[in-house]
Image (spheres, rainbow, N blue to C red):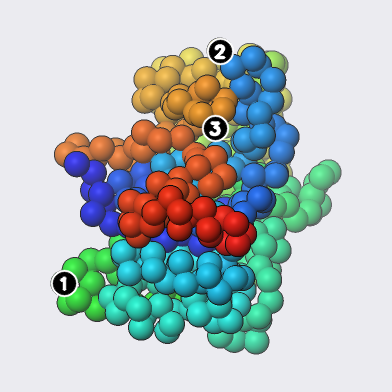
Amino acid sequence: MAALNHIRVLDLSRVLAGPWCSQNLADLGADVIKIERPDSGDDTRAWGPPYAPGPDGKPTGEAAYYLSANRGKRSVTVDIASPDGQALLRELVRHCDVVLENFKVGQLKRYGLDYESLKAVKPDIVYCSITGFGQDGPYAHRAGYDFLIQGMGGLMSVTGERDELPGGGPQKAGVALTDLMTGMYATIAVLAALTHRDRTGEGQYIDMSLLDTQVAMLANVGSNYLNSGKRPKRWGNAHANIVPYQTFACADGHIIVAAGNDGQYQKFVQAGGRPELALDERFATNPQRVKNRDILVPLLAGMVKERGRDEWIAMLEDVGVPCGPINNLDEVFANEQVKARGIEMTLPHPTAGEVKLVRSPMRMSALPSTSAKAPPLLGQHTEEVLAEILGKSGEEITALREKKVL
């Protein structure tokens, strides 16, 4: 048993936000049917290198980017621009609980695959649209991309080094946070809509926007602005309200020190052999340290530079000061805690032999939460799905292929 093994999803989305949502649903057991363009498929299939290595060690055609967001799904190729392809998808919708798409506003209406059209086919369908700016408003018809939305939605105004320091200026996050968070919010909305359907029999339409998500995920930063009227600034790896709460260069690397109270600060400087910094009135309390950060932080930086990273971590852990390393990805996946939690997993793959993936972080005591299927090859399950769900014969499928519908 899996939590969602009674749910079937028709996934018309591609790239990241939509596929991240459907991968969450697949991880929870849903049957996700990924509809892709014949011949080319999801855009991210071509977003490489790197590609997964094959048994001979040479790169396959499976882009690592695509693999990151598509495990546990079944791939079916359909030309949705053709009338026969549109009819095929409407047939599939009759057997699905959820439709997920991220086309531009109004584009699927031309194909009879919009919410109103599919609601007529399956009245209780849960239909989730993901766009850059939502279904209404002056920007509704603009294309939305994660990088643009990180800028427009305020994230880059508070990310990056302080303007007055070397390297200062706006900076995007190293991963596509807006896409990923939109996929996460979409997952929650779909699950809520399914619960509502199960209680009432009523389906519904979900309008997810990257910009809405980005503004919402500003969290305390957005709330600070709304309640103070003051524009927040970039702090780099420092904290606007706590000192010291930042990165420091050691003799052989970097560490993070997160001294959240006066006691932890005192233990930090005592461990570093500078107890006088705890007694100085300018640094005795957090408000004073925030006020005098430009004096204090260089003194702390000089102190930290005197010892190596591992020595500092051992000393600070011993006295209860929150700290940690800044790991490269080779260090992340070699970390004993990461290994103990089994976050890296290997799944069999039809061309690569096996692929390495990151396990879903959802862990539940009563139900499995990790898909056991690798991301599908392009069109890998076309015949299987059409035969199993729609009862199509081999001759019918061959005819569709000859008409280039599949």
| Rendering quarter of residue 396 | bottom left
Q: Nearer the viewer, mark 1 or mark 3?
A: 1
Q: Nearer the viewer, residue 402 or 275?
A: 402
Name the outermost residue toward the front: 395
N-terminal label among 2 and 1: 1
- Residue where numbered disc 3 is placed: 257
**Residue 177: horizontal and vertical position, in percent?**
57, 52
Is any atom of residue 158 visible in this view? no
322 relative position to 190: left or right: right
User: Please, what is the three-letter code of the amino acid marked with disc 3?
Assistant: Val
| Rendering quarter of residue 360 | top left
Q: Nearer the viewer, residue 378 or 243?
A: 378
- Residue where numbered disc 1 is placed: 199
Kindly state the secondary structure of the residue where label 3 is placed.
strand
103 over 324 or under it: above or below: below
**Residue lying at 28% horizontally and 57% vertically, measured from the top left:** 7
Whole-Å distance between the Cαs marked 2 and 1? 57 Å
Whole-Å distance between the Cαs marked 2 and 3? 13 Å
- Residue where numbered disc 2 is placed: 311
Whole-Å distance between the Cαs marked 1 and 3? 49 Å
**Residue lying at 59% horizontally and 86% vertically, measured from the top left:** 137
Kindly state the secondary structure of the residue where label 2 is placed.
helix
Is any atom of residue 246 visible in this view? yes
178 over 359 or under it: above or below: below
User: Please, what is the three-letter code of the amino acid marked with disc 1?
Assistant: Arg
Q: Residue 369, labelled with which disc?
A: none
